[in-house]
Image: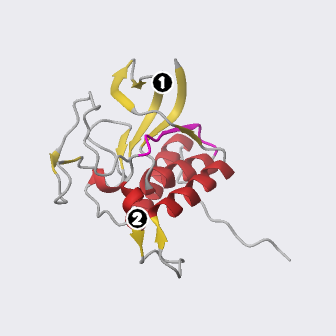
Amino acid sequence: MIETSVAVVGGGASGLSAAMYLAKADVETLTFDNDKSVLHKAYIKNYPGKVEPLTGITLRDEARSLCDQYNAKIVSEAVEQLTTQDSKFLIITSENSYLSDYVILATGQNPLKFLDIDVDKVDGAQPFVKTNLPVSAQGETSVPNLFAAGVVAGHPSQAIVAAGDGARVAVHVISRIKGEYWVDHDVLPKE
């Protein structure tokens, strides 16, 4: 059994953004990425800071590079079951079992077939999503320490919105773990 502080389920814009923020704050995190993000089909012309349009694959690769820079661990395993065990979350893949104190679901449009937890659900807000998880202002679902970010939480599917929501939820999880509001501001080095 492998243990971690936070498990992020999903390797799209939302999940990778959350993973990067968590790792940058020195929070032990595993991100489960089955590489089925809709970023594979995305052609993005409206991402602030990018003058030229970029593909979703380029965005994903740049996000993974940032995750590597901060030592975020990405596991190339599909989650088959997410349940609870001894007040923690049990994540089961075909290869391993993991225990985590917190989970951030960032599964995008993918159905939540692996979810074996009694959590509040609503019909999908987006026409291509069957189920959303209602969340608090911090991104927490009806189950304590189970968070959702991006499309699965009912937000629009644009990459910039999903990435921002992943970061927002990660900041709230980091704040809870550290016991004080977490601020992540980098400044230019002094010349």
Q: Where does residue 173 sit, x and y in percent of width and height? A: 47, 46
Q: Is residue 189 left or right of residue 134?
A: right
Visible in this render: residue 183?
A: no
Q: Secondary structure at mark 2?
A: helix
Q: Residue furthest left?
A: 123
Check residue 34 for magenta coloring: yes
Q: Which residue is mark 1?
A: 98
Mark 2 nearby-residue class (10 Å; few <14, some 14–19, many ≥20): many
Q: Residue furthest front?
A: 41
Query: Where, by quadrant of the figure, is residue 91 drawn?
Result: top left
Cβ–Cβ below 8 Å for labels 2 and 1?
no
Residue nearest the observer in this picture, 129 or 143 = 129
Q: Please tell me which of labels 2 and 1 falls first in the chain.
A: 1
Specify the amino acid type for callout 2: Ala
Residue nearest the observer in this picture, 140 or 123 = 123
Q: Which mark is residue 159?
A: 2
Magenta span: predominant SS is loop
Q: Is residue 154 left or right of residue 58?
A: left
Query: Where, by quadrant of the figure, is residue 8 drawn?
Result: top left
- In this picture, is 43 found above or below 165? below
Q: Which residues are magenta?
A: 26-35
